[in-house]
Image (cartoon, rainbow, N blue to C red):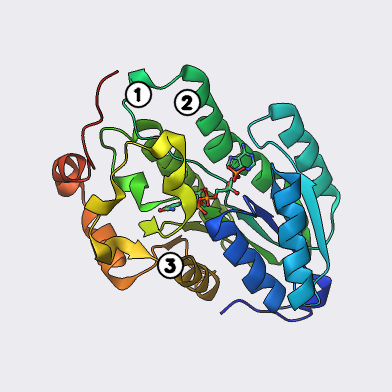
């Protein structure tokens, strides 16, 4: 279980804060007494979430409107975080999906995804880790996906970037051994959020996904915070079992074929 001693003094930073999973992290952490720094790219949505949480819990909340694919803005954000001395938790959660063939997606959209899922979390981890190590305390949650192990048609960049995040997290965790700083790759299967409601995901047929692969945002947050000392967390027992099978090298060709949701129409 996450240690919440002196949590009033502690700050949790959450990216993609207003989204389905991010907002659940915010509510839960506010409930545990954390001060929050909410980061997303829509100021009215940030203001609304901050007001809702403040009405309910007496949490100190700051917001920052940042487009996390903009390199200059992310560098400025990283500088800001590096200067903060009380960050106890960083949740790199912002993300988006794609559901077309690699060649049918605009290259700028691919680069945005690489920036959001790879460049930004790497930069923010690099900004907060020195402070955490100096204080010998803190945790980072990098929200990846079970898709990290499903390199299949229609989610080429998503799968590749989430695999990067898992490998990066696992390797950094080795460097943190012997300290009280932890890092986790959170790898949910399918979460009931608006993730699938975007234009970019319009060709994804969510109804074809078996019910047992779906988890709620609340359950994902619970599993993540309960197991902050684990490097890879796959929420949900059935998903966890599947995840173990999928990680076996012999399973890879089958996973590639079976995990393809539907072959997207070529443009
Ligand atoms: N839903 C799933 O089935 C699922 C499964 C496994 C992993 N995940 C991962 O879980 C994380 C959260 O996803 P979710 O399901 O909560 O989806 P979501 O409801 O769409 O939330 C994603 C959040 O990220 C924000 N975001 C996207 N691009 C951004 C940018 N350029 N700058 C700043 N913020 C940006 C979104 O803001 P806007 O609202 O402005 O777009 C939104 O608040 C993602 O990393 C996703 O890959 C999701």
Residue 216 position (above or below residue 191):
below
Q: Residue at x 47, y 18 (%)?
A: 107
What distance separates the C-alpha of mark 3 from that of mark 2? 28 Å
Point out the tag, 1 or 2, that comes first from the N-terminus: 1
Callout 3 secondary element: loop
Provide the residue designation for mark 3.
216
Q: Quadrant of residue 254?
A: top left
| CA neighbours of label 3 inside 10 A, class few (<14), some (14 to 19), many (20+) | some
Point out the tag, 3 or 1, that comes first from the N-terminus: 1
Residue 234 position (above or below residue 265):
below
Q: Residue at x 51, y 55 (%)?
A: 174
Q: Which mark is residue 110?
A: 2
Q: Is residue 218 left or right of residue 236?
A: right
Q: Is residue 148 left or right of residue 177?
A: left
Label 1 CB-ligand 1 distance < 8 A: no
Label 2 CB-ligand 1 distance < 8 A: no
Marks 1 & 2, CB-CB < 8 Å contact: yes
Horizontal and vertical percent position of residue 113 = 51, 32
Q: Which mark is residue 181?
A: none
Callout 2 secondary element: helix
Provide the residue designation for mark 1.
102
């Amino acid at each position: 279980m996450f240690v919440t001693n002196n949590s009033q003094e502690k700050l949790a930073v959450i990216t993609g804060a207003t989204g389905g999973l991010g907002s659940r992290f915010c509510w839960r952490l506010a409930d545990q007494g954390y001060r929050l720094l909410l980061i997303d790219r829509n100021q009215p949505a940030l203001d609304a979430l901050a007001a809702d949480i403040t009405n309910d819990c007496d949490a100190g909340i700051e917001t920052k409107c940042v487009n996390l694919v903009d390199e200059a803005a992310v560098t400025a954000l990283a500088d800001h975080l590096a200067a903060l001395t009380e960050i106890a938790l960083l949740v790199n959660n912002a993300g988006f999906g794609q559901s077309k063939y690699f060649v049918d997606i605009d290259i700028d959209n691919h680069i945005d995804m690489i920036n959001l899922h790879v460049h930004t979390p790497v930069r923010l981890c690099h900004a907060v880790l020195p402070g955490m190590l100096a204080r010998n305390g803190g945790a980072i949650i990098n929200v990846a996906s079970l898709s990290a192990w499903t390199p299949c048609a229609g989610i080429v960049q998503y799968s590749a970037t989430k695999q990067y995040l898992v490998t990066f997290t696992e390797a950094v965790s080795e460097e943190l051994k012997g300290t009280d700083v932890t890092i986790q790759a959170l790898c949910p299967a399918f979460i009931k959020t608006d993730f699938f409601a975007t234009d970019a995901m319009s060709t994804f047929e969510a109804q074809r996904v078996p019910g047992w692969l779906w988890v709620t945002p609340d359950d994902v947050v619970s599993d993540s915070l309960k197991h902050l000392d684990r490097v890879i967390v796959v929420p949900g027992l059935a998903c966890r079992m599947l995840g173990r099978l999928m990680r076996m090298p012999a399973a890879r060709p089958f996973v590639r074929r079976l995990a393809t949701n539907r072959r997207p129409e070529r443009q």
